[in-house]
Amino acid sequence: MPQLRQDLSTRRWTIIAADRAKRPDDFVKRSSQAAAVSSYSPTCPFCAGNEDKTPPALYVLPEEAPRNERGWDVRVVPNRFPVLLKPTDGPESRKRTHHGLYSEMDGCGEHEVVIEHPDHSKTIATMTVQEVTGVVRAYRHQFLELDKSDWNQLIIIFRNQGEGAGTSLVHPHSQIIGVPIVPQDVRWRLDEAQRYFDDNGTCVHCDMLDAEIREGIRIVATNPGFVALCPFASSVPYEIRIVPRRHASSFGVLADEEAELLARILKDTLGRLYSLLANPDYNYVVRSAPHHSAGEPHFHWYLEILPRLTTAAGFEIGTGINVNSVAPEAAASHLGKAC
């Protein structure tokens, strides 16, 4: 019998369709498994040695490394094709223009690319913990830099892996965007967390984390700072959340020791996906509180990983209810056994 499950933090429903259950091998894309990627591409703007193909770097690691020639481990550059542009007149750019019923505003914000490694063939799953730690520290540095500007009401960190997840470049990279508004979906998550806090006096994500640790059946991996788990109402097969044990609403307060612990569990978790599902397409996003909500007690930041193994069809579009053919308990078991 299928189950309707509700996510306590969003109140969204998912159908867990056990009768459609699939094994991990059913999701493997056979045609892409043999595709080899070289360590350098002369046409790739992100490869070491091709620094002249990008705008000048905003930040590099190590910090003493050259910014615009070989020698860096992680490099952050402005996106050459940004979805939002840095405003010329600061917060004034957020003013609306009205056209009858409708309103618009300038597309102000900031859009950066985190080039995660000089090697074209790497991905988070195949990097060392030290290399992934550098990526996480670059995330934190640029998050804090963008958060200094009042026009950036929300800082979003995300990674698109593979064509099915929307990426156009193979080279390992992530993106960071400062957005001048707080979108309705984010407001919704904040409001639900606030409602739960008002009703119970506790953080919904802390309570969910405690319950998952006690039950144990949806846990993928743990370390002293973080827990990786398949949510009770996972919206897609093999969805994973990496949740910090320490309550904090903003990713920007990540401590140095937590950066390494996050890198360890991120590499571990993505390595399990890489092994189990033969390097699947996925998106991950850091869900953090907006600029003016960074100190609020009701929200709890986390990193969400969504493998792109299925396609939403008419039922999902028409109802907003996802159909997941892999129960999160089964997904966690498969991932827990993966190398």
Image (tube, helix red, strand yellow):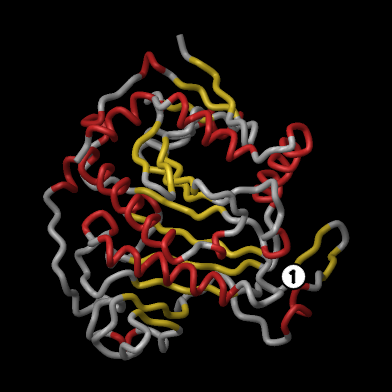
The reply, left or right, for residue 87 in relation to residue 246 is right
Residue 101: which quarter of the image? bottom right
**Residue nearer the viewer, 96 or 115:** 115
Q: Secondary structure at mark 1?
A: loop
218 lies above or below 247: above
Q: Position of residue 330 (x, y in %)?
A: 34, 24
Q: Nearer the viewer, residue 145 or 259?
A: 259
Question: Is 207 on the left-hand or right-hand side of 229?
Answer: right
| Quarter containing the N terminus | top left
* Quadrant, the C terminus: top left
Question: What residue is shown at x 41% (from left), y 78% (from top)?
Answer: 76
Q: Is residue 217 left or right of residue 141?
A: left
| Residue 190 pos. (x, y %) | 69, 47
The residue singled out by tag 1 in the image is: 105
Q: Residue furthest right?
A: 100
Q: Residue at x 19, y 48 (%)?
A: 32
The picture quadrant where one finds residue 318 is top right
52 or 213, which is in the foreground?
213
147 sits left or right of 46 in the view: right
Disc 1 residue crowd, few under 14, some 14–19, many 20+, Cα 10 Å = few
Q: Residue at x 75, y 78 (%)?
A: 91
